[in-house]
Image (cartoon, grey):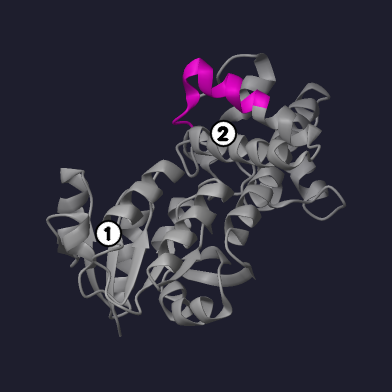
Amino acid sequence: MGAVAFIGLGNMGLPMALNLVRAGHQVTGFDLSPAAKQAASDGGIVLAGSAVDCVRGADVVITMLPAGKHVLAVWEEIIGAAKPGALLIDSSTIDVDSARAAHALAEAKGLRSLDAPVSGGTGGASAGTLTFMCGGSAEAFAAGRNYLEAMGKRIVHCGGAGAGQAAKVCNNMILGATMVATCEAFVLAEKLGLDHQALFDVVSTSSGQSWSTTSYCPVPGPVPTSPANNGYKPGFAAALMLKDLLLSQEAAASIGAVTPMGAAATGLYQRFVAEGSGEVDFSGIIGFLREGTLDH
């Protein structure tokens, strides 16, 4: 078992770090939030007084932060304190250019690194069933796999530096667009007099099937564990979906890719969040599509 430094103990980072503790790793953590620090301490994570102190002596350093600028600022701060041979893993969802810049920082210090964003939301983080999409060298991937397996169920090596972030924005662009289409279909079904369960029974076993229907159905009833059965409490908040969709559109613009469905989903989530629904689960957009008002 290794010594792990975990920086960023928020809604995703904390349960991920706690799963590392449960797997037998020695975890030292750092966060700016007093509440996060208290919860981490209660879970057996040793608290450090600073990000630099957190990484001293760690075999693996994991960051889970809001945006690329935060990742780069923290990596620039800590990289001089990392021990020789340490592996740096960033599991934040950030832009591809920032991910590649973080890899370059590590390489300049002779350190291995992975960009390893996740899919699965807070539920997957707590249950240890996340999917990790990893970018970096084969050597870095092999070194990090044991740690990632303590936090996730599926660990995929997507390619070189930045490939994990590229996979994440593509995946979540699909998710955002298919959720909008799924919500539209259920709203259309309502207006045609079709029962939610009847539509679910057809779609879940037919060509329209998707994760948005079978695992995260946006109407109450058919999938008891979906946020629709809990007042659209996230889950995966609409503001986070919008962040990922904006990253997808930024990536598309940077290389001249045409993504009309992704752009349309981005515009809808921008309107949904602008109306005050950023903390609503992203499937709650069905209310906006149903009546042009919020249904929560």
Spot occupied by residue 200 in the image (x, y as percentages of width and height): 75, 45
- The reply to whether callout 2 and callout 1 are in contact (CB within 8 Å) is no
Residue drawn at the location 57% of the way across and 63% of the way down:
161
Residue 195 visible from this viewpoint: no
Spot occupied by residue 33 in the image (x, y as percentages of width and height): 20, 43
Does 96 appear above or below 294? below
**Tag 1 residue:** 78
Spot occupied by residue 167 in the image (x, y as percentages of width and height): 65, 56
**Tag 2 residue:** 242
Relative to 143, 63 lies left or right: left
Question: Which amino acid type corresponds to the residue marked 1 in the rendered image?
Answer: Ile
Picture quarter containing residue 262?
top right
Q: Which span is picked out in magenta?
A: 267-280
Question: Which amino acid type corresponds to the residue marked 2 in the rendered image?
Answer: Leu
Residue drawn at the location 66% of the way across and 42% of the way down:
251
Picture quarter containing residue 34?
top left
How packed mark 2 is, by other alpha carbons closer than 10 Å (few <14, some 14-19, many 20 or more), is many
